Amino acid sequence: MDREHGEREDSGLRSSLALLVMLAPNATLGITLAVMPPILPQLASVLHGMQPAQLMTSIAAFGMIAGGLFSGRLLHYLGVRPLTLASLLLFAVSGTSGFFLDDVFLLAASRFVLGIAGVCFSTAAMALTTARYVGEARSKVIGWQQAASQIVNVATVFLVGLLAQALGWRSPFVLLGLYASCLLLVSALSVRPLPLLTEAQISRSGAGNYLRIMLPMCAIAVLMGILTLVPMTQLPFALSDSGLGDVRHVSLVGGVNFAFAAISAIGYGWLTHRIGKRSAFALGLIIGTAGIALMGQTASLSGFCLSAGLAGLGTGLYNTFVFDVGVEIAPPGRQADGAGLLFSFIFLGAAINPLAVQPFQAAFGLHGGLIALGIAGLMGGLGGVRIGRARSVSSDTSAV
């Protein structure tokens, strides 16, 4: 009896630890990027320019884009446990390299590898999620993943600021190593192997059909990546243009954005149960783009907080939708491939955010450009869902 009780306790502990791993994919990618902005001014003085310092942020995103394209295949080749442990070990090593590297090219290479390691781990964690949860339970967990990411973003910016101020600009890189080491220990204790797909099974899923099914969601993911970054890249300039560019104001408005994104992501499962997934996405898109448009109309701190909150509510809903529906429509056994592909395209959108925003601002100015971008984002997102739904119906019909 004692032995059976002990086995049940062990199983319950392992299950709880595995859930922590499943909640970590978006948070892992988030901390990769969030560790950089607070130390950019100090890093710029070391690397002799703001451009090389900014490269350290964007190069990690390009690593995520590249890694997401092959992380699914790597998962089928290695298995979920080996990929989880290997990618976290690589994340820890490459993440802490900034603590001792001075050469800009070596630092950039380590950040690129860090991005690849992060997205490989995230793909493995999504494989665990899709294997364990289905239906509404999976929707809730994917919402929790998004919420965990927002919480980690806020905590990272706060801790990095404290560490950099107390111990110098290199110290925050140790945070990446500590994060990955803790997650590695949890994964080693909890992650079990999953059955691997054979090459024949992958071939039967149909590569062409798989890409055709995923293409509309990938297009939506690019747009959502662009919209998600608007508060982070444009709000500081809008605040400054309105005479509110103090660091405290920027931090307050950014915190409001992250907090409301976490709230809506947690509520995603509850909301989709009542109004459906596409309606939840449409609602999130309307609220989020309204927030972006409001950024261009307001000039008060309360107005900017309101706009950031609305944009955050939208972010939590439409980013959760992308991964929830993306893994749902992927062929059986290839949900993790689909998640890796979506990670690539989300960060592609984030990487091209400045290029996407610039034409609107060139034509309408800083504030008018935000209003125009909000309108264009709403139209593009709703159009993408309409096309995706039509393709989904078409593929279902052809399958019959």
Image (cartoon, helix red, strand yellow):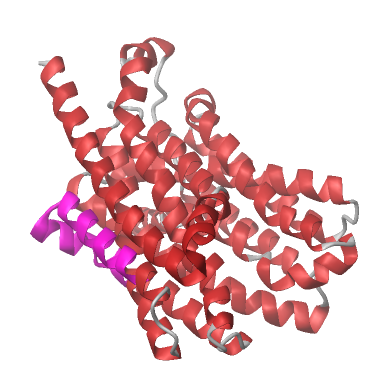
Q: Residue at x 56, y 56 (%)?
A: 183
Task: Determine if the magenta segment contains residue 283.
Answer: yes
Q: Residue 222: in sight, yes or no? A: yes
Q: Residue at x 47, y 63 (%)?
A: 364
Q: Please identify the quarter of the rendering in which residue 158 is found.
A: bottom right
- Quadrant in which the N terminus is drawn: bottom left
Give residue 310's position: percent from left, percent from top. Answer: 32, 73
Q: Residue 142: in sight, yes or no? A: no
Q: Please name whichever residue, 361 or 224, is drawn nearer the observer in this view of the structure.
A: 361
Q: Please name whichever residue, 288 or 178, is drawn nearer the observer in this view of the structure.
A: 288
Number of marks in picture = 0
Q: Is residue 181 left or right of residue 72?
A: right
SS majority, magenta: helix
Q: Residue at x 52, y 31 (%)?
A: 69
Q: Please identify the quarter of the rendering in which residue 144 is found.
A: bottom left
Q: Is residue 234 left or right of residue 104?
A: left
Give residue 267's position: percent from left, percent from top. Answer: 24, 67
Does 194 appear above or below 283? above
Q: Residue at x 51, y 53 (%)?
A: 359
Does 75 appear above or below 320? above
- Quadrant in which the C terminus is drawn: top left
Q: Which residues are magenta?
A: 262-291
Give residue 358's position: percent from left, percent from top. Answer: 55, 55
Q: Please name whichever residue, 26 or 309, is drawn nearer the observer in this view of the structure.
A: 309
Task: Determine if the magenta segment contains residue 61.
Answer: no
Give residue 305's position: percent from left, percent from top. Answer: 41, 83
